[in-house]
Amino acid sequence: MTSPSTTLSLADTDPAELTVDAVVIGVHSQSGTDAPTPPGPGGFAATLLLATGAESIAAAFDGRLTETLALLGATGAPGEVTKIATLGTVTAPLVVAVGLGPEPTGAAPAPETLRRAAAGAVRALAGAERVALTLPVPDDEDAPAALRAIAEGALLGTYRFAGYKTRPQPSLRPPVREVAVHVPDAGDARAQAEVARARHVAAAVALTRDWVNTPPNDLRPPAFADAVTDAARAAGLTVEVLDERALADGGYGGILAVGLGSEAPPRLVTLAYDPPAEAAPAGGTKRVALVGKGITFDTGGVSIKPAQGMWEMKSDMAGAAAVAAAMIAIAELKPAVSVRAYLPMAENMASGSAYRPGDIVTMRNGKRVEVLNTDAEGRMILGDAMARACQDGCDYLIETSTLTGGQVVALGKRIAGLMGTPEFCTRVQAAGDAVGEPAWPMPLPEDVRKGMDSDVADISQVNAGMDRAGHMLQGGVFLREFVEDGVDWAHIDIAGPSYHAGEPTGYWTKGGTGVPLRTLLELVDDIAANG
């Protein structure tokens, strides 16, 4: 497993005098000018604008920094990284310009722009010991959000899964060891609090990514439950683990059915956090339930998946990983709200003992489900966990899962699907937008539910008449059956955003992304502050 080794600090020394291996500055692409920029030496137009924070660096270059960067091909495009040797003009031997896109009118760059820029620059500087970031932090009420974004991005950009290679990789340079974020006052208590929070958040994202990236033979349900238990207890959380016998005694038919095909039995892990007594509001704390899908590998079962791409099904437990790691961060951040997490874990395998299409399964809340497709296993284990969360008592229930390929078809690889109580979904969407994890609200149509009526049970697992049409909506409609009246709830389908199969971009690396962990933390903070 990977453990974060990069340290993060604040600095208020003049950037031109910082003793570091590299200073990172922001540059904007020029836009909105009526006349072309006059060409500089060699005929190249200096089309860049320096972002706030680079003033002393520019002065050391006698005002020719943007011109020099343009000669090197810099355009200011978002995430673009251009390096220039300083040759003694400033203390650092290297200045790195990272693109921030067009300069916003009358405002600082968006936090997500800063988060991605910081990550890209720090990743490009792998091998350096100490790096300083002098990206723009506004001197107003938006300062905390900008500083938080820069700090998170810097740490997330250093993530690297340790992997299983048996030989050293000489071409793979180690991540930056120390990052200093430049601010006007390094002693400011609010700035220090934002950096401390970023450390906890980045560590939780790294833990999520580690679990998602771990090969499935090393993280079957009992092993995953043990890993979560160890991390949660170390953070001071209360832990309960139900094994297959306890699941049978408790009536968790959905979890047990999915786990029947595997020799590695299923588990249900519950985690509990309560705020310190002195932090609890006078009117009592709100109760939040987080539920995450923990299918440690999904073959589809008897309704087996195609072989192509099946290896990515090791990430089918990304929801549980994000929820578990979010709870560990919550234990560190100590919000004034009670939070319970429910992590159903199973391995969906094809074997002589696997559950079958046509089976009738009795769920935790007593409802009976007709199984039509064993590859719709996520909703089976989640229904049990959501029923348990409601039985324990909660005001808000947030469930997240890699539930349907329909989410990817409809919304792509970066935008999650969002269903549930409309007013509450608006809050979830706002939380995701604030941290750069967008989600889009989707409906729960009654015609979809009508098509899930069963001749022999209370509900069918899928809408057979629609096949894969409205596939994402079918998942949400099914899960609604396990939410008690009066509970505000949301289902976040992260089938696309939870795993990145491409090359590193922004603060995403290849593999697990950690989505929607930061949304969950932002939402818990919002509930703690606003009820």
Image: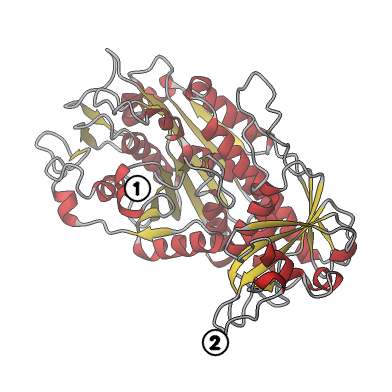
- Left or right of 397? Residue 420 is left
Quarter of the image for residue 456 reads top left
Tell us which disc is closer to us: 1 or 2.
Answer: 2
Q: Is the residue 86 above or below the residue 242 in the image?
A: below
What is the three-letter code of the residue carrying label 1? Val
Image coordinates for residue 446, horizontal then vertical, percent: 18, 56
Q: Work out whether residue 163 can be spotted.
A: yes
Q: Is the residue 456 above or below the residue 51 in the image?
A: above
Residue, x 33% and y 18% (percent of image)? 261
Task: Judge by depth and name the residue closer to the eye, 56 or 66.
Answer: 66
Residue, x 86% and y 56% (percent of image)? 92
- Left or right of 375? Residue 278 is right
> What residue does disc 1 label?
408
Is disc 1 surrounded by few (<14), some (14 to 19) or many (20+) residues within 10 Å?
many
Q: Earlier in the sequence, mark 1 or mark 2?
A: 2
Task: Judge by depth and name the residue closer to the eye, 19 or 179.
Answer: 19
Image coordinates for residue 455, horizontal then vertical, percent: 9, 37
Helix, strand or loop at label 1? It is helix
Task: Judge by depth and name the residue closer to the eye, 324 or 6.
Answer: 6
CA separation in Å, label 1 and label 2: 41 Å
- Left or right of 469? Residue 38 is right
Task: Judge by depth and name the residue closer to the eye, 292 or 482.
Answer: 292
Q: Which mark is residue 14?
A: none
Q: Which mark is residue 34?
A: 2
What is the three-letter code of the residue carrying label 2? Asp
Q: Is the residue 49 above or below the residue 302 in the image?
A: below
Image coordinates for residue 36, horizontal then vertical, percent: 58, 82
Image coordinates for residue 299, horizontal then vertical, percent: 34, 25
Residue, x 55% and y 33% (percent of image)? 211
